[in-house]
Image (cartoon, rainbow, N blue to C red):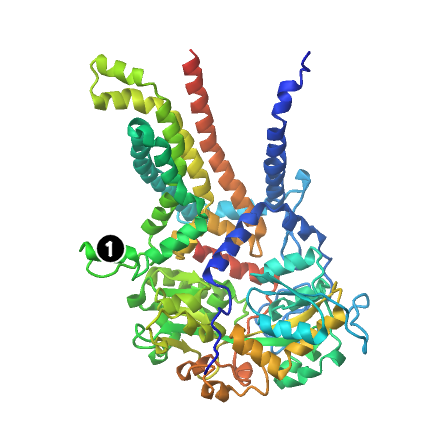
């Protein structure tokens, strides 16, 4: 393998910290607070969730695997007509930080003879707040767990599939996913799993040798070296799975109470820590055990200190496929000034070569391309053989569990448990 | 030329504008968020500007958690403990240094002060990140401690221990204590110290009964200057620990502001500010009393 991504894929530690601090210091930024006043009234019929045990209602429908959602269309928010020619740009892209290969974007700019501008965000909340305040971004990268809200608030415009023939390149299941049946507002971007990242030289025996692999987080030998992802949904969902609860969007109070006790138990047992720096802390050796995203573990090898063999990195994902699986999507912003060009960009990014280049050269998170054979990824050494577990397969979507939108009351319940855990009380 | 009676008060105008635009208005915004609602879709804060429509749900939520042993009690107690210890350690380090520079710095005074302040031209976050590297298993701290045989094996300083976070707070803020302390100590007339010695006081007695009382204003000012940012700190525990066991009020505020209950985050901010207002009142009353005593 001659060319590997050498730059980081994802945010580096310095940037992450600066930005998260800056975000926090912006507490008194009246602009953001005032912006929130401008929200639309809720639209869409309140509908109970499907088969998830919670009976609460939300001002938008909650998509579940067993309750596929066809997102509502609104007369005052139509998709663009077919057959228009692209605008002159510049195309304004609003994306996660370091989640897009600049060379691939440059190729698009050259092909369409336009300029592109990438603006980045660190959290979905931050991004949505900005979109709501009114901006002229063209392309946005929403996570499926916010789609109901974004559509209800009319922040996205429906996509016109006539411009998106490359959607055919994606896994059939994601051409009409349950969170956006018929791809009314989104097309798939990348996919990932959440598993256990660990140091093979320290974590002995490895997670798979436990009856319940998640129990490895309670091993006192790894005190001070054990990390959960600093994300309440991911961390708490993992503990639900440990307890055999596969509805990772549950509102069941008993199940969540158990998670609460398990979280507090983790603090007692190993003084568990939280971070989203799985891709640097594990290779650097500060963390031996870190709940981790698969894409981050593809990247982690580039953060190993000199002389440390890459086989020290391990990634466990349930072999039966019963783990956390997620996807990111691409969409067109409602107030886009270049909606046709934005469609062209979405289509461009679903092209087999472009999507692969974006993954391989920089992002490290895998696009759900039918042409991308997971076995070849290992053979071609894009992914090291022992990290084959980081590769996402189409069938994983059938067996895996996805974090999805919660009803507001349920979300508050989750968040309050997390806040109590984070207080160290 | 006759001066308008507004001439001198006008000099204070920038200060009043500053206070109004950058403190009173934002504070009212925080209050309006704390006592406001959230929008039903995104759970973003919706400030309520009219006090008659305020709802106190966020404060009720917090007060429930303020019972001993509960979430907010623990987090406030920990914050006060960390800041208290960090303040004491900072004074133990800062006072002798300021004393040395003021008394014995001679013509090196300016250079010594510069030397203390220079590292702090670098941003706080950068300095904390540097400590992350220094404190790692194979970092210089462990290497040096092993070389001088204090440690046999590297210690995991970053395992989420309180002492590392308190150390970070001290390191981050101590120079801002030294500067006002130096200013106070430098102002003490040498005549007073000589008079004290002439009247038979020992050096220790002179320090205790002359130097220390005369530097009280500097101690208080320095303590206020460094304690206030420490109370709002959340990135030091984030960077040097990451364990829930070392999180401070600032971390909880950060968490709630970005979660579905921003009202609780704003209410915690208001609560923290009112606690600090009590400390500030003590500071203001004490300094006012001291300046009155000086005038007499």
Using residue A380 as the reference point, say whether residue B86 is left or right of it.
Answer: left
Above or below for B54 versus A297: above
Is residue B221 visible to the viewer in this orientation of the structure?
A: yes
Image quadrant assignment for residue A195: bottom left
Which residue is more in the foreground, A137 or B104? B104
* Quarter occupied by residue B21: top right
**Image height check: is A153 above or below B103?**
below
Kindly identify the residue that appears in the image at 37 percent across and 62 percent down: A272
Q: Residue at x 65, y 48 (%)?
A: A31
**Quarter of the figure with residue A288:** bottom left
- The crowd level at tag 1 (other Cα within 10 Å; few <14, some 14-19, many 20+) is few
Q: Is residue A46 above or below residue B94?
A: below
Name the one closer to the observer, A59 or A316: A316
Along the line of sight, which residue is nearer the eye, A23 or B196? B196
What is the chain letter for disc 1? B
Q: Would you name the residue on which mark 1 appears? A: B144
Is residue B219 in sight in this rendering? no
Residue A359: image location, x then y, percent: 55, 77
Total residue callouts: 1
The furthest residue to the left:
B149
Counting from the top left corner in percent of width and height, residue A350 is at: 64, 79
Per the image, label 1 sits on a secondary structure element best described as helix
**Left-right relation of A79 to B7:** right
Residue extending furthest toward the front: B107
Q: Position of residue A230 (x, y in %)?
A: 47, 62
Query: Residue B184, image x and y in percent?
Result: 38, 26
Q: Is residue B281 left or right of residue B10?
A: left
Residue at horizontal 38%, vertical 52%?
A: B246
- For the N terminus of chain A, the image quarter is bottom left
């Amino acid at each position: 393998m001659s060319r590997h991504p050498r730059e980081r894929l994802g945010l580096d530690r310095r940037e992450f910290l600066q930005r998260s601090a800056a975000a926090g210091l912006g507490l008194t930024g009246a602009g953001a607070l005032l912006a929130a006043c401008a929200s639309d009234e809720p639209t869409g019929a309140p509908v109970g969730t499907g088969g998830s045990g919670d009976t609460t209602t939300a001002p938008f429908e909650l998509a579940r695997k067993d309750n596929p959602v066809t997102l509502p269309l609104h007369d005052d928010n139509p998709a663009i007509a077919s057959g228009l020619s692209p605008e002159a740009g510049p195309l304004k892209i609003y994306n996660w930080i370091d989640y897009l290969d600049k060379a691939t974007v440059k190729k698009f700019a050259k092909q369409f003879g336009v300029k592109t501008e990438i603006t980045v965000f660190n959290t979905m909340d931050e991004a949505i707040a900005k979109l709501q305040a009114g901006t002229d971004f063209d392309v946005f990268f929403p996570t499926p767990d916010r789609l109901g809200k974004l559509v209800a608030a009319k922040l996205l415009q429906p996509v016109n599939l006539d411009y998106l023939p490359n959607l055919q390149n994606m896994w059939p299941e994601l051409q009409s996913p349950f969170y956006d049946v018929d791809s009314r507002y989104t097309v798939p971007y990348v996919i990932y799993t959440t598993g256990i990242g660990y140091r093979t030289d320290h974590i002995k025996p490895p997670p798979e040798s436990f009856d319940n692999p998640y129990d490895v987080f309670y091993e006192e030998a790894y005190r001070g070296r054990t990390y959960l992802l600093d994300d309440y949904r991911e961390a708490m969902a993992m503990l639900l799975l440990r307890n055999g609860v596969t509805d990772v969007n549950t509102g069941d109070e008993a199940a969540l109470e158990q998670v609460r006790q398990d979280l507090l138990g983790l603090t007692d047992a190993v003084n568990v820590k939280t971070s989203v720096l799985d891709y640097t802390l594990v290779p650097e050796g500060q963390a031996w055990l870190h709940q981790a995203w698969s894409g981050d573990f593809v990247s982690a090898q580039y953060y190993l200190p000199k002389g440390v063999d890459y086989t020290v990195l391990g990634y466990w994902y349930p072999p039966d496929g019963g783990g956390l699986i997620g996807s990111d999507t691409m969409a067109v912003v409602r107030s886009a000034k270049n909606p046709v060009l934005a469609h062209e960009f979405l289509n461009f990014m679903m092209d087999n070569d472009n999507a692969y280049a974006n993954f391989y050269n920089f992002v490290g998170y895998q696009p759900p391309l039918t042409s991308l054979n997971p076995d070849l990824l290992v053979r071609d050494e894009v992914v090291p053989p022992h990290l084959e577990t980081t590769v996402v397969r189409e069938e994983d979507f059938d067996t895996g569990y996805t974090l999805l939108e919660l009803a507001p009351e349920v979300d508050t319940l989750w968040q309050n448990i997390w806040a109590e855990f984070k207080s160290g009380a | 030329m006759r001066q308008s009676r507004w001439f001198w008060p006008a000099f204070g105008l920038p200060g009043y504008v500053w206070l109004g635009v950058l403190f009173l208005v934002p504070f009212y915004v925080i209050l309006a968020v704390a006592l406001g609602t959230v929008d039903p879709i995104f759970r973003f804060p919706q400030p309520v500007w009219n006090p008659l429509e305020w709802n106190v749900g966020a404060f009720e939520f917090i007060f429930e958690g303020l019972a001993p042993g509960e979430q907010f009690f623990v987090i406030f107690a920990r914050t006060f403990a960390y800041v208290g210890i960090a303040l004491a350690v900072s004074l133990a380090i800062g006072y002798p240094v300021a004393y040395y520079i003021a008394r014995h710095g001679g013509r090196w005074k300016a250079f010594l002060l510069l030397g203390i302040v220079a590292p702090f031209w670098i941003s706080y976050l950068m300095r904390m990140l540097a400590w992350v590297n220094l404190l790692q298993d194979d970092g210089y701290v462990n290497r040096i401690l092993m070389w001088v045989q204090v440690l046999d094996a590297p210690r995991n300083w970053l395992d989420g221990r309180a002492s590392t976070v308190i150390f970070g707070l001290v390191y981050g803020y101590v120079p801002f204590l030294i500067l006002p302390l130096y200013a106070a100590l430098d102002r003490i007339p040498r005549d007073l110290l000589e008079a004290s010695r002439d009247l038979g006081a020992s050096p220790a007695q002179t320090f205790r009964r002359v130097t220390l009382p005369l530097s009280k204003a500097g101690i208080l000012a320095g303590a206020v200057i460094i304690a206030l940012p420490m109370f709002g700190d959340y990135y030091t525990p984030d960077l040097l620990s990451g364990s829930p066991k070392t999180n401070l009020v600032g971390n909880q505020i950060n968490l709630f502001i970005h979660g579905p209950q921003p009202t609780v985050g704003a209410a915690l901010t208001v609560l923290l500010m009112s606690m600090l207002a009590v400390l500030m009142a003590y500071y203001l009353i004490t300094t006012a009393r001291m300046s009155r005593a000086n005038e007499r």
